[in-house]
């Protein structure tokens, strides 16, 4: 596990609230559980916290941890097909380890920005 310094906070490429659910874990389908998470993209890590405060104190204190995180190295991101969710503006992230998550926003602009940022992060860290 990492230890995070205060300066990590300033390296977050993108953060904001998104609706998130895991759909597959270690290659096995899991039951959807949509929750709104404060989402942070930082380097090759995508982190989900219950709220912004959790993320902030986690960055600041080394004490609290994000509820969930995925490694984007070797991951893929794409717009989710209609059969994955009835919601609008859904992205599907698949990790190298066989975790699949859906992220969703009611704002198309927001989701387009996340798609761009995630694709960029995946590209940047692909060969690490
Ligand atoms: O892919 P599914 O099974 O249609 O996903 C829906 C379910 O997870 C549903 O909950 P139940 O497990 O109580 O049926 C959720 O309320 C829905 O939001 C899920 O579908 P969407 O299309 O919203 O991702």
Image: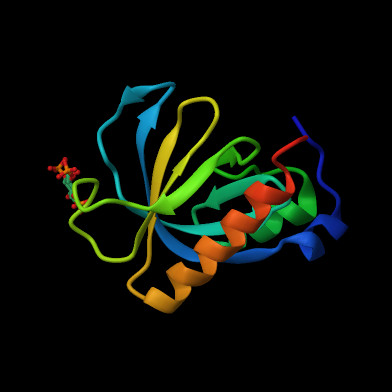
Q: Nearer the viewer, residue 99 or 53?
A: 99
The C terminus - image quarter? top right
In this view, 125 is above or below 9: above
In this view, 100 is above or below 39: above
Residue 56 pos. (x, y %): 68, 60
- Say left or right for 123 vs 95: right
x 59%, y 48%: residue: 47
Residue 113 pos. (x, y %): 53, 71
x 86%, y 50%: residue: 5
x 74%, y 54%: residue: 59
- Say left or right for 54 vs 23: right
> What colour scheme governs how the chains and residues are painted in the rendered image of this protein?
rainbow
Residue 16 pos. (x, y %): 54, 67
- Say left or right for 117 vs 82: right
x 39%, y 22%: residue: 27
Q: How many numbered dots are placed on residues in this image?
A: 0
In this view, 96 is above or below 66: above
The N terminus - image quarter? top right
Residue 77 pos. (x, y %): 48, 49
Q: Nearer the viewer, residue 32 or 84?
A: 84
Where residue 23 sits, quadrant-wise, is top left
- Say left or right for 120 vs 48: right
């Amino acid at each position: 596990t990492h230890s995070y310094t205060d300066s990590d906070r300033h390296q977050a490429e993108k953060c904001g609230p998104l609706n998130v659910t895991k759909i597959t874990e270690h290659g096995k389908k899991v039951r959807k559980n949509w929750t709104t998470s404060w989402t942070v993209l930082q380097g090759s890590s995508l982190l989900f916290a219950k709220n912004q405060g959790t993320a902030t104190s986690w960055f600041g204190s080394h004490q609290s941890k994000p509820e969930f995180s995925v490694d984007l190295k070797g991951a893929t991101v794409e717009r989710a097909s209609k059969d994955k969710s009835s919601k609008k503006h859904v992205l599907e992230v698949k990790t190298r380890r066989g975790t699949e998550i859906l992220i969703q926003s009611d704002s198309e602009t927001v989701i387009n920005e996340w798609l761009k940022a995630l694709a960029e992060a995946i590209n940047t860290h692909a060969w690490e």
